[in-house]
Amino acid sequence: MSETKSGVLALITACVIWGLSGLFYKQLDHVPPLEVLAHRTLWSCVFFALVLAAQGRLADLPAVLRQPRQVLVLAVAALMIAANWFLFIFSVQVGKATEASLGYYIFPLVSVLLGVVFFRERLGRVQGIAVALAALAVIVLTIGLGVAPWVSLIIALTFGLYGVIKKRLPLGPVLSVMVEVLLLSPIAIVVLLFAWRDGGAPLGNGAGDLALLIISGPLTATPLILFSYATKRVQLATVGLVQYLNPTLQFLVATVVFAEPFGFWHAVAFPLIWTALALYSGASLWQARRKTPSTP
């Protein structure tokens, strides 16, 4: 198998895992979402440590932790990704997985705006139309449902800010996320200790729950490793297009499997988002082809 084909396969696998992860977290909807997040953090830390040890890179960790400025940046990134993970778990548990999928749909368009704000990137005409359509979709939902889709907006914003923070870090994804979950681990331990003190079940209700909570670690880490592998072998335009598989599967799980309500206002807003993404993706592909030198 060629490098490109293996990269595409890894990318699709990562997006399928992300897209179907709601099915996994639904099995833990009787466990408070903050406790699920705490376990996800701790077991991710264990899994990443094992991966780094297998790669012979665990010795790189102390050097990163000795740089206070870099640790501070990673701490902010950790807070962003923790908020993102929590909201996704919360949305699955309370019947708002459709809103979560909308958040991951609009994330690329939020990233475009963040690029303008933080990196002074220029917004093309088609990109501007795409962002305007996304904003219109949010307005439609806000007016139609009587409340802003806060879950969607915060998921998109936290993930977008996470990307902004990570963009300039000179660390690979495995090492950087290892530091992030390591920094979050003391908070996770405190959360579980408080749950135990208050008479809860911080290890879940039996061996089945504990097994699922442990699996949340590799379930978090594996797609990230696959995604990192893919981005080194696949064109960014392809990565951008295939990534939409994630929110699409989330959307199908929410509406078909979880049978969450999908009313008139959703039926208006979602096509606006899909149109915006089609315009954005088309513009990205066109720009990528212009930058690629033609072969004689």
Image: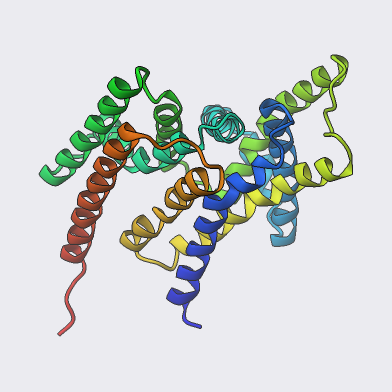
On screen, residue 226 above or below 163: below
Left-right relation of 110 to 187: left
The location of residue 269, given as percent across then percent down, is 29, 36
**Residue at point 84% right, 45% down?**
208
Residue for point 74% across, 61% down: 54
Q: In the rendered view, does 85 fall on the left or right side of 169?
A: right
Going by the image, does 72 lie left or right of 145?
A: right
* Residue at position x 48%, y 44% in the image: 255
| The residue positioned farthest toward the left in the image shown | 125
103 in relation to 247, above or below: above
Is 296 drawn above or below residue 71 in the view shown?
below
Question: Of residues 166 and 202, which is closer to you in this image?
Answer: 202
Figure quadrant of residue 147? top left
Q: Nearer the viewer, residue 13 or 116?
A: 13
Task: Residue 81 in the image: state x and y as whole percent.
Answer: 54, 34
x, y percentage for residue 253? 52, 48
Asked if residue 162 can be seen in this view, the reply is no
What color scheme is it?
A: rainbow
Count the numbered circles shown: 0
Q: Which of the two residues, 33 or 162, is positioned nearer the viewer here? A: 33
Classify the position of the C terminus by image quarter.
Answer: bottom left
Q: Residue at x 28, y 47 (%)?
A: 274
Q: Nearer the viewer, residue 93 or 56?
A: 93
Q: With 272 as the anchor, is 157 left or right in this view?
A: right
Q: Seen from this angle, which residue lies furthest top?
A: 198
Residue 256 image position (x, y, % from top left): 50, 48
Instruction: For residue 296, say whether it is visible.
Output: yes
